Image: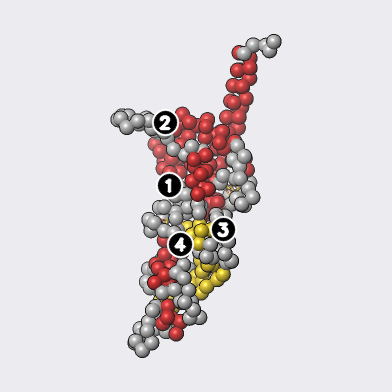
Amino acid sequence: MTEPDRRAEGATAGVPLVRGAETLVVRIERQDGPSAPARWEEFHVERRPNANVISVLMQIQRNPVTSDGKKTTPPAWDAACLEEVCGSCTMNINGKVRQACSALIDKLAQPVTLQPMKKFPLVRDLAVDRSKMFNALKRIHGWIPVDGTYDLGPGPRQAQEDQEINYVLSTCMTCGCCLEVCPQVSPSTAFIGAAAISQARLFNNHPTGKMQADERLRALMDLGGVGDCGKAGNCVQACPKSIPLTSSIAEMARDTTRQALRDYFRRDERKGSAGPAG
Ligand code: SF4
Ligand code: SF4
Ligand code: FES
């Protein structure tokens, strides 16, 4: 074990070291805050069996000393469920956007590079602010309103085929991978992104959620809606839940066209029933 390895594991000079322990090299893009300059820091840590990226970050957090022996601040990142359900640990790992909790070190090439997602405002180091995704869900009315606390009785029945489609759509964890790889998402564009479009499909497919379908479709017809998708298909490749995002986009594009026609004819009918202007 080299001197940096000794430091990374918190070993003290004079204490016997475990011979032949494998070392892992991790490079992290650090940034102290949104307006601070970015920098790279490299760490050597002991390679442990079955480690994932989060556990390696925790090793570094316990002893934040770079591979050239400089004491630094512990890196910041987000994580919650540790089982690829909450999406909060999403970052770029060796250049690919994915969840740090399910990224196993043994399957990654070295040095392991960690960078924050670039399509979201940076909070610090590897932590970003995903609020725009949650705001997009508010915009498309991504829920089913249930009024009151009384027993509503059993919900409407759904065909098996619809249940199967909806189940996959419901696994979205708002992780942001689909926005990170989308060429239409940038600080200068208003594009809502594939996740919210797919959630509109989910709630519009629901027998009760259908009642607010018009509202969701109109939200997708606004600036930055489904019409801004360039149909490159990067999103569907990047989705860790294998959600058929391009099908959702195609279905919502078709439904928004129908909604636009419905709205046009309704306006026309209203004008007709008001009688000739006089
Ligand atoms: S199809 Fe392309 S442009 Fe459309 S949401 Fe997916 S990645 Fe973005
Ligand atoms: S659609 Fe997939 S990639 Fe996009 S936020 Fe949901 S789970 Fe993540
Ligand atoms: S910690 Fe929840 S997805 Fe990784």
Earlier residue among tags 2 and 1: 1
Q: Amino acid at mark 3?
A: Lys
Provide the secondary structure element on which disc 4 rests: loop
Crowd class of label 3 (few under 14; some 14 to 19; many from 20; radius 10 Å): some
Cα separation, mark 4 vs mark 2, equals 38 Å
Point out the image quarter for the N terminus: bottom left
Q: Quick check: is the Cβ at mark 3 less than 8 Å away from ligand 1?
A: no
Crowd class of label 1 (few under 14; some 14 to 19; many from 20; radius 10 Å): some
Residue at the image position 59 percent from the left and 66 percent from the top: 37
Q: Amino acid at mark 2?
A: Thr
Residue situated furthest bottom in the rendering = 14
Cα separation, mark 4 vs mark 3, equals 14 Å
Cα separation, mark 3 vs mark 2, equals 37 Å
Residue 130, placed above or below residue 20: above
Residue behind mark 2: 208
Residue behind mark 1: 171
The reply to whether residue 243 is visible in this rendering is: no
Q: Amino acid at mark 1?
A: Thr
Residue behind mark 3: 118
- Checking the image for residue 77, the label placed there is 4
Observer-nearest residue: 71 or 244?
71
Provide the secondary structure element on which disc 2 rests: loop
Q: Quick check: is the Cβ at mark 1 less than 8 Å away from ligand 2?
A: yes
Point out the image quarter for the C terminus: top right
Give coordinates of residue 64: x percent, y percent.
44, 73
Cα separation, mark 2 vs mark 1, equals 19 Å
Earlier residue among tags 4 and 2: 4
Give coordinates of residue 86: x percent, y percent.
41, 52
